[in-house]
Image (cartoon, rainbow, N blue to C red):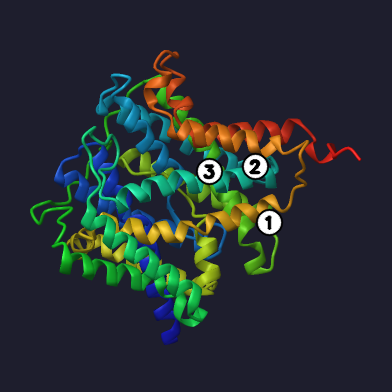
C-alpha cells in the first residue's frame, strides 16, 4: 500500500475526527449527562461513525463521503434543548421523545431505501430547494460553531453567559490563519489546513490558556440503552424529530448530487437506495444509544475539492483508524480533551464552503424580480425565526412550538412546498 494512501488516510481521519468529536461533547453538555455517559457516547461515536463510513464505502453509495452525525439533527437537538425549559419540558422527557422520533425516522429511512423510493424523493429536492437547504444549513451550524469559538456553553445557555475573551481571540487568530492558508498557498499545502489547524490550535490553547479537561480521567465506558432518556411521548417533539428525519434525506441527495462532477458520473438509483439503507441502520443504532443520527456529510464536497482525495481507500483507512481510536479507551480519552473552541473554529472555516455549494444550486434556477419569492420567502422567514426569542411563540399550541422555533425546518419545508407546487421557471419578467 502506497505511503500517499496512508497520509491521505490520516487526513481523512482528522476530518472525520473534527466533524465528530464535538458533537457528543456538546450534546452531553446540553443534556447535563454524567461524565461516564459523555465518555460512553464519545467512544460510541468514534466506533459507530468509523463503521458507518466503512459500510457506505463498501455497501452504500461507494464514494468517499463522510457518513457522520447529521448537522441537521445536531442543530435541531440543540435548538430543541434551548426551548425545552420555556415549555416546561424536562430533559428526560425531551431526550425520551427524541429517542422515539429518531427510531421512527430510522424505520422511515430504511423503508425508503428498501422499496427504492430514494430517487423519486430526490426529485422533490430540486435545485431551488437544495440552494435554500445549503444556505440555511450553513446559517444554523455557523451559529453553533460561533458559540463554541466565543466560549459560550452549548444548548440552553444561562442568561448570564458571557464571551470568553481569551478563547475568542485565539479562535479569531486560528480562523484567519486557516483562511489565509487556503487562499494563498497551493493546493498541495492548503489541503492540510484543517489538520494543521487542529494540531496548532490545540497546542496554542494549552500553551496560552491551559488544558481544557472536557472528560476527566476517571470517566469510563459503560454501555447503556437510551442515554438521553427512556422513550417518552411528547407529540410535538416526536413530530419535529420525524420531520427532521425526512428533511435529513436532503443530506443524502445533496452529498451524492454534489459529488457527481468530482466522480464524473451521475448518481444511480441503486446508490441512493443503498446509501439510505446504511443511513437508516445507523440512525436506528443512534436512537438506541442516544447518539445523533447519521447521514452523508454535504461538507465532504468542500473537503474533497480542497484535498483532491476522492479515492475510497484513504477514506476506508481513515474510517478504520477512527473506529480503532474509539475501541481503545486511552486514545479516545486523549482526543476527547480537544478544546471545543478549537474544533468549532476548524469546522467554522470548513462550513463556509456551504455558501459556494448554495450558490451553485441557485445558478441552476432562473431568478428574476417576479419569481424571486421562491427562494427569498423560505430564506428570510427561516433566518428571522432563527434569531427571534423562543418565548415569542409560547402562546401557540405546545405540539407546534418545536417546529416553529426551528428556522431551518420551517425554511426547508417552505422551499419544498413552493418549488413543487408552482412552476416558477414559467414566470418571466414583463418586457
Under circle 1, the secondary element is loop
For label 3, the crowd category at 10 Å Cα-Cα, with few meaning under 14, some 14 to 19 and many 20 or more, is many
Where does the image place residue 381, in percent across and percent down from the top left? Answer: 56, 32
The answer to whether residue 58 of the structure is visible from this angle is no
Q: Residue 268 carries which label?
A: 1
For label 2, the crowd category at 10 Å Cα-Cα, with few meaning under 14, some 14 to 19 and many 20 or more, is many
Q: Give the CA distance from mark 2 to mark 3.
A: 11 Å
Is residue 360 positioned above or below 395 on the image? below
Please give the name of the residue rendered at 32% of the width and 65% of the height, measured from the top-left corner.
173
For label 1, the crowd category at 10 Å Cα-Cα, with few meaning under 14, some 14 to 19 and many 20 or more, is few
Please give the name of the residue rendered at 32% of the width and 26% of the height, measured from the top-left corner.
84
Quadrant (top left/top right/bottom left/bottom right) for the C terminus: top right
Is residue 373 positioned above or below 203 on the image? above
Left or right position of 221 against 395: left
Camera-near label (2 vs 1) is 2
Where does the image place residue 420, in percent across and percent down from the top left? Answer: 72, 34
The answer to whether residue 185 of the structure is visible from this angle is yes
Please give the name of the residue rendered at 52% of the width and 59% of the height, measured from the top-left corner.
353
61 and 193: which one is in front?
Answer: 193
Under circle 2, the secondary element is helix
Under circle 3, the secondary element is helix
Which numbered disc, 2 or 1, marks the residue that appears first in the sequence?
Answer: 2
Q: Residue 136 carries which label?
A: 3
**Residue identifier under label 2:** 129
Which numbered disc, 2 or 3, marks the residue that appears first in the sequence?
Answer: 2
229 and 74: which one is in front?
Answer: 74
Q: Residue 425 carries which label?
A: none
Amino acid at each position: 500500500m502506497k505511503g500517499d494512501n496512508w497520509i491521505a488516510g490520516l487526513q481523512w481521519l482528522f476530518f472525520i475526527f473534527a466533524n465528530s468529536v464535538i458533537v457528543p461533547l456538546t450534546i452531553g453538555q446540553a443534556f447535563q449527562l454524567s461524565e461516564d455517559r459523555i465518555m460512553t457516547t464519545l467512544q460510541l461515536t468514534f466506533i459507530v461513525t468509523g463503521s458507518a463510513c466503512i459500510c457506505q464505502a463498501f455497501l452504500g453509495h461507494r464514494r468517499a463521503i463522510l457518513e457522520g452525525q447529521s448537522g441537521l439533527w445536531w442543530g435541531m437537538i440543540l435548538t430543541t434543548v434551548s426551548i425545552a425549559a420555556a415549555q416546561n419540558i424536562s430533559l428526560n422527557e425531551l431526550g425520551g421523545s427524541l429517542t422515539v422520533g429518531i427510531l421512527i425516522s430510522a424505520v422511515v429511512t430504511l423503508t425508503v431505501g428498501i422499496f427504492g423510493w430514494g430517487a423519486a424523493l430526490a426529485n422533490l429536492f430540486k435545485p431551488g430547494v437544495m440552494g435554500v437547504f445549503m444556505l440555511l444549513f450553513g446559517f444554523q451550524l455557523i451559529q453553533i460553531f460561533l458559540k463554541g469559538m466565543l466560549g459560550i456553553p452549548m444548548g440552553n445557555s444561562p442568561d448570564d453567559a458571557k464571551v470568553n475573551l481569551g478563547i475568542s481571540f485565539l479562535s479569531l487568530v486560528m480562523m484567519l490563519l486557516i483562511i489565509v492558508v487556503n487562499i494563498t498557498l497551493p493546493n498541495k499545502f492548503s489541503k492540510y489546513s484543517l489538520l494543521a489547524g487542529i494540531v496548532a490550535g490545540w497546542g496554542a490553547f494549552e500553551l496560552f490558556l491551559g488544558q481544557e479537561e472536557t472528560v476527566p480521567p476517571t470517566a469510563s465506558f459503560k454501555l447503556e440503552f437510551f442515554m438521553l432518556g427512556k422513550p417518552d411521548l411528547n407529540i410535538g417533539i416526536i413530530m419535529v424529530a420525524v420531520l427532521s428525519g425526512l428533511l435529513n434525506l436532503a443530506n443524502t441527495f445533496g452529498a451524492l448530487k454534489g459529488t457527481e462532477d468530482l466522480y464524473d458520473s451521475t448518481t444511480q438509483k441503486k446508490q441512493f437506495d443503498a446509501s439510505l439503507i446504511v443511513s437508516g441502520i445507523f440512525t436506528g443504532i443512534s436512537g438506541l444509544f442516544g447518539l445523533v443520527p447519521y447521514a452523508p456529510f454535504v461538507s465532504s464536497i468542500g473537503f474533497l475539492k480542497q484535498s483532491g482525495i476522492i479515492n475510497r481507500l484513504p477514506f476506508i483507512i481513515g474510517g478504520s483508524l477512527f473506529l480503532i481510536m474509539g475501541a481503545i479507551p486511552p486514545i479516545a480519552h486523549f482526543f476527547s480533551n480537544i478544546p471545543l473552541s478549537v474544533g468549532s473554529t476548524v469546522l467554522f472555516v470548513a462550513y463556509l464552503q456551504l455558501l459556494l455549494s448554495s450558490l451553485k444550486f441557485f445558478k441552476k434556477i432562473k431568478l428574476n424580480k417576479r419569481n424571486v419569492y421562491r427562494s427569498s420567502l423560505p430564506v428570510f422567514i427561516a433566518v428571522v425565526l432563527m434569531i427571534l426569542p423562543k418565548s415569542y411563540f409560547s402562546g401557540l399550541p405546545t405540539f407546534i412550538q418545536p417546529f416553529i422555533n426551528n428556522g431551518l425546518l420551517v425554511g426547508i419545508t417552505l422551499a419544498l412546498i413552493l418549488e413543487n407546487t408552482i412552476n416558477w421557471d414559467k414566470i418571466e419578467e414583463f418586457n
